[in-house]
Image (cartoon, grey):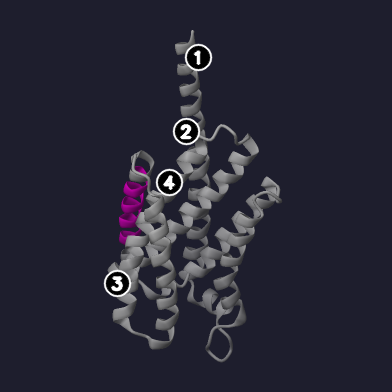
Amino acid sequence: MNTIFENSQVQNSSASVKTFFRSVYTYMFAALGISGLIAFRVGNDPALFTDYFISSTGGFNPLFYVVMFAPLGLSFVIQWGYDRLSMLSLTLLFVLYSGLMGLMLSSIFLVYDMQSIANTFFVTAGSFGGMAILGYTTKTDLSKLGSLLYMVLIGMIIASVVNVFVGSDSMGFIIACLGVFVFTGLTAYHMQKLKELAQNAQLNNEQKNKIALIGGLTLYVLFINLFLSLLRILGGRD
């Protein structure tokens, strides 16, 4: 009888984990779809892009900078508001975040040719998928790796800010290469953490639903950043 009960618990746990990750990937693919459609629509219409983001003097208007930095603020609101916000509020913020990211990504269509964007997307999908499987299946604790990668990420962000003023192509290439290493590694790290959360029997359904949304957002952000890093390395400019 004990064996039957234990087997039942394992099956229930396995089904719960599958349901959790189904939700995580649903959120991730929904965000990619929203962002992709908006980016493609705006980026392939230079007149529309100009109306939205270019001022009469030829430079970027304030809306461009709002779109650029608003997703960062929204991501903090979503993660910090996990306990306070309802699932509906989190979902609406998630959709808004995806839309703003789409507007921000529209600029890549003005810089890189379509073939490069498509090829890089498939390379990103393969790399991301491989590291996600590794993170899910590995028995090795990736916590130390995650901490190290976040330290490298902070260094990358500082170097990127410096390079805005320096304008060094070599530095940009090095940052992009580091980005590929960092974002693939963080994909494996976060997959392992999400698996641990999915197996946590102390979390109720509402908590797991919220964590699935945040997990989908996290994987989406990692995918986008990996894509942009690879695009800087592999992309052919128009």
Q: Is residue 132 magenta?
A: yes
Q: Position of residue 28 (x, y in %)?
A: 49, 49
Residues at marks 2 and 1 touching, judged by CB atoms closer than 8 Å = no
Q: Is residue 143 magenta?
A: no
Q: Position of residue 213 (x, y in %)?
A: 57, 47
Q: Quadrant of the C terminus?
A: bottom left
Labels 2 and 4: the sequence-earlier one: 2
Out of 40 and 177, give the one closest to the viewer.
Answer: 177
Amino acid type assigned to the residue bearing label 1 in the image: Phe
Image mark for residue 212: none
Image mark for residue 191: 4
Which residue: 32% across, 55% down?
A: 122
What range of the chain is rendered magenta? 118-133
Residues at marks 2 and 4 touching, judged by CB atoms closer than 8 Å = no
Labels 2 and 3: the sequence-earlier one: 2
Residues at marks 2 and 3 touching, judged by CB atoms closer than 8 Å = no
Q: Position of residue 41 (x, y in %)?
A: 50, 65
Residues at marks 4 and 1 touching, judged by CB atoms closer than 8 Å = no
State the separation of the CA atoms marked 2 and 1: 20 Å
Q: Residue under circle 2?
A: 18
Task: Say whether residue 237 is visible.
Answer: no
Front position among marks 2 and 4: 4
Determine whether the residue tagged by mark 4 lies in a helix, strand or loop: helix
Labels 1 and 3: the sequence-earlier one: 1
Determine whether the residue tagged by mark 3 lies in a helix, strand or loop: loop
